[in-house]
Image (cartoon, helix red, strand yellow):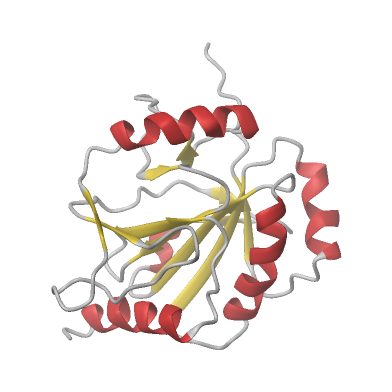
């Protein structure tokens, strides 16, 4: 029986080198004025549109506090899925922003933050310290939801190019794009990105 160890700093570096080859779909930078999504970027990274993605499979994600999350259950909404870890400094910056976004009351948007930490006992104190109250927190220590490199046995559209990394799912449940590194999800530009994919579900 082969076991899969969750991503750490070393495996993520390897994953960033090989993840592009692990996704069987072309990725194109989002550009305004070409029929694609409005631009959204940080100082180091930009939102990259993904073409030809398949729907996210129904994999139960254990949830902090009990129960499970299944991403297809959010079908009809835009879903922001963030992968993070307690050892990641940038995640400490981004998670409170995501928490505020989750608590903003936007009805057509769901925000899910999935930790890849192997030691589950670290997560609850970390979440409490950051005062995260609105985020749906999930666990993926076994790499069932995301992978750090090319792993044929794992059926997931999520590849960990870096940490943190956020994927945007459209209203049909498919991955529409991603951005690595922490981002300002409360910005006007982020709002336009959400509007773009939400309007797609309304036939706009």
**Of the pair 72 and 193, the residue shown nearer to us:** 193
Above or below: residue 196 compared with residue 27:
below
- Whether residue 195 can be seen here: yes
Q: Would residue 26 be found to the left or right of residue 157 on screen?
A: left
Q: For the point 45% across and 36% down, which residue is it?
A: 16
Quarter of the figure with the C terminus? bottom left
Q: Residue furthest front?
A: 43
**In this orientation, which residue lies closer to the viewer: 122 or 15?**
15
Please tell me in which quadrant of the rendered image residue 152 appears.
top left
Question: Does the rendering let one see residue 108?
Answer: no
**Position of residue 190 measured from the top left corner of the image (x, y, whole percent):** 44, 78
* Image vertical order of residue 22 relative to residue 108, above or below: above
Instruction: Name the residue at 18% across, 52% down.
Output: 52
Q: Position of residue 25 (x, y in %)?
A: 21, 44
Q: Residue 166: give x, y in percent of width and height.
A: 48, 58
**Above-or-below relation of 198 to 1:** below
Q: Residue at x 45, y 46 (%)?
A: 59
Q: Is residue 150 left or right of residue 37?
A: right
Residue at 14% from the left image edge and 74% from the top image edge: 35
| 2 lies left or right of 88 | left
> Is 76 positioned to the left or the right of 103 in the image?
left
In this orientation, which residue lies closer to the viewer: 110 or 22?
Answer: 22
Q: Position of residue 3 (x, y in %)?
A: 57, 18
């Amino acid at each position: 029986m082969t076991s899969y160890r969750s991503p750490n700093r070393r495996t993520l570096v390897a994953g960033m080198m090989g993840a592009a080859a692990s996704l069987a779909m072309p990725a194109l930078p989002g550009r305004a004025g070409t029929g694609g999504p409005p631009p959204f970027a940080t100082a180091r990274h930009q939102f990259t549109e993904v073409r030809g993605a398949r729907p996210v499979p129904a994999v139960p994600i254990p949830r902090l506090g009990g129960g499970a999350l299944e991403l297809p259950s959010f079908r009809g909404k835009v879903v922001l899925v963030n992968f993070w870890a307690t050892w990641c400094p940038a995640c400490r910056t981004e998670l409170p922003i995501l928490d505020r976004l989750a608590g903003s009351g936007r009805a057509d948007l769901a925000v899910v933050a999935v930790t890849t930490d192997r030691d589950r006992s670290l997560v609850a104190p970390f979440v409490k310290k950051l005062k995260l109250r609105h985020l749906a927190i999930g666990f993926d220590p076994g790499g069932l939801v995301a992978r750090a490199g090319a792993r044929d046995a794992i059926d997931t559209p999520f590849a960990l190019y870096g940490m943190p990394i956020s994927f945007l799912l459209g209203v049909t449940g498919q991955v529409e794009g991603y951005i690595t590194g922490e981002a300002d999800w409360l910005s006007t530009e982020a709002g336009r990105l959400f509007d773009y994919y939400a309007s797609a579900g309304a036939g706009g």
